Each structure stands twice: as C-alpha cells, then as structure tokens.
Amino acid sequence: MRVTCPVCMHHCQLEPDQVGICHARKNEQGNIVSINYGKITSLALDPIEKKPLARFYPKNFILSVGSFGCNLRCPFCQNFGISMAAEKEVRTKFISPSHLTEQAIELIKNGNIGVAFTYNEPLVGYEYVLDTSRLLHEAGLKSVVVTNGSVTTAIAELVLPHIDALNIDLKGFSEKYYKKLGGDLETTKKFITLAASQCHVELTTLIVPGENDTREEMAALSAWVARIDKDIPLHVSRFFPRYNMVNVDATPVSTIYALAYEARKNLQYVYTGNC
C-alpha cells in the first residue's frame, strides 16, 4: 500500500519498497522507516567553529558524524558524495547510538563536548539523532545538528527538545531560489522560528553569484531574522565551485564583506566565512 512520508515538505508518496527523494527513507510493509539509521559514512573530531558555531562553547571540539541522504538538491553541495548518494553508492559502518555515545565520552579528554550530526542532512534520519541525543544528555554531553531545516513542524517538535544547538542553512530569501534547490522557504522559516525558541541557533547563508547575492535580499533576510531575535548569529559564507557548479566563479570576497555589512544593520553577530 502507498504511504505518505511525514518527514519533510516533499511528502513523498511511496509504494511498497520505494525509497523517497532523500534516499534515506523507505516504505517497508506499509511503514515509513529510516534506512540510514546508524549507517555512518563520516566521523571526525572537529573544532566546533567548523560547524560553524561561533557562540556555542567556542574553542572546544565536537565529534562529528554523518550518514547518507538529503532532501534538497543543491547544485553546489560540497558533500555530494554522501548527501546525494543512495545506500548502494556509499560505504558505511554501523555505529549504534550507545557506541557513538561511548566514543564521544572517550574523547572528552581531547576537548570533546558531544556529537554533531552533520555532513549529510541528519534530520532525514531523525530517529538516530533522537536516540543518540537522549544518551548524550544522560552522559552530560551536548547534541548539535547541522541542518537545512527542511522538515515538518511535527518532526521539529519531536526532535528539538533533545538538541542543544543547531546551525541551520538559510539558503536565501526567495521562494524562487528555494524551489531551484528543491526546497521550500516557508518550511525552513517555520523550522528556524521554532528552533530559536528552544535551542541555541546560528544560521549560515552561502552566497552564490547571480542567485542570492544582492543587498536587497540580504536586507530582507537579516530583517526577518532580527524579528525573531537580533542576537541570532548569521554566517555569510563564500561560494566555491563544487559539484554541478564547477564552471561558476567563486563569490568575490568584496561581495561577502558588503553583504555582511548589510546584515549588521539588523543583527548583532554577523560572521564572514570561507574568506
């Protein structure tokens, strides 16, 4: 029987054994299940500033973990080898929530404060994030999610109470651009609003030449964020040629600085990235 996936704005209608757009969820015997649960493609101890988080336990490290799958199709994705991949296209290693928590505890001596779910889109496999976060909190550690924020309110309300901090990609501030990426701006805005009421939130906007690089768009974006909380940090990040956009020039550094200047008219904490 066909079943609707409840996780994101695509609401994939999946026939038996069919996998969703994200490559991470499947209709198994009438139930939508995560097929990337605990299947890890990437694991590294990173500086927390790399997430990027500038105002959440700075100068510490966090065990960063990724699986496969994503519900957007950004043509500039830097992790496309895992985020755009189906299960059969990647090598994975199963790490249970308890084992990952044990690894995080072991790394406390190296400055680790918890686990960051990152590299691919973690919330398409939200069950693993949820199960691991509960164990991390029992151990006194932090749970961090790096996400595109493209999930339904129902999933957000389930997961956010167990998360300490998020970096959320706010790709731009036009519905036209979001549709080009396979997303929905309103879904992301709802997620950001809800997350900011419960967790430490920082935002990242990757500035792509000719797409979201005008002062007018940054003025609108930063003004909207300020209406939630002017103290939400915004990372204005420079694009480099990647994936299906290798023939596009990198964003001029001057553009990044100009847009950061524009954002600072509305926001208290604005950072430039990849410059």
Image (cartoon, rainbow, N blue to C red):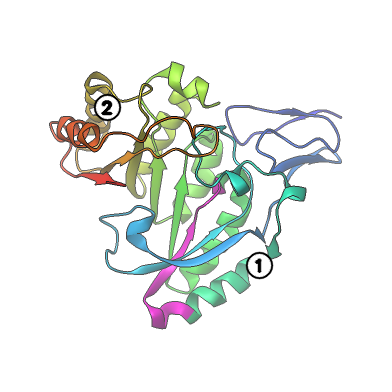
Give yes or no for contact between labels 2 and 1 (Cβ–Cβ under 8 Å). no
Q: Is residue 182 visible?
A: yes
Q: Which residue is mark 1?
A: 95
Measure the C-alpha gap from mark 2 to mark 1: 39 Å
Give residue 143's quadrant in the image.
Answer: bottom left
Nearest to the observer: residue 5 or residue 73: 73
Q: Is residue 87 left or right of residue 191?
A: right
Q: Is residue 35 visible?
A: no
Vertically, is 94 above or below 107?
Answer: above
**Relative image position of residue 85 (x, y in whole percent):** 67, 44
**Relative image position of residue 14 (x, y in whole percent):** 78, 30
Could you tell me which secondary element the residue under label 2 belongs to?
A: helix
Category of crowding for the residue at label 2, using alpha-carbon neighbours closer than 10 angstroms: few (below 14), some (14–19), many (at least 20)? some
Q: Residue at x 55, y 48 (%)?
A: 120
Nearest to the observer: residue 115 or residue 119: 119
Q: Is residue 247 left or right of residue 20?
A: left
Give residue 113's quadrant in the image.
Answer: bottom left
| 109 drawn magenta | yes
Could you tell me which secondary element the residue under label 1 belongs to?
A: loop
Query: What's the magenta region?
Result: 107-122
Q: Which residue is mark 2?
A: 224
Which kind of residue does numbered mark 1 sit on?
A: Ile
Give residue 128's quadrant in the image.
Answer: bottom right
Nearest to the observer: residue 38 or residue 176: 176
Q: Which quadrant: the N terminus?
A: top right
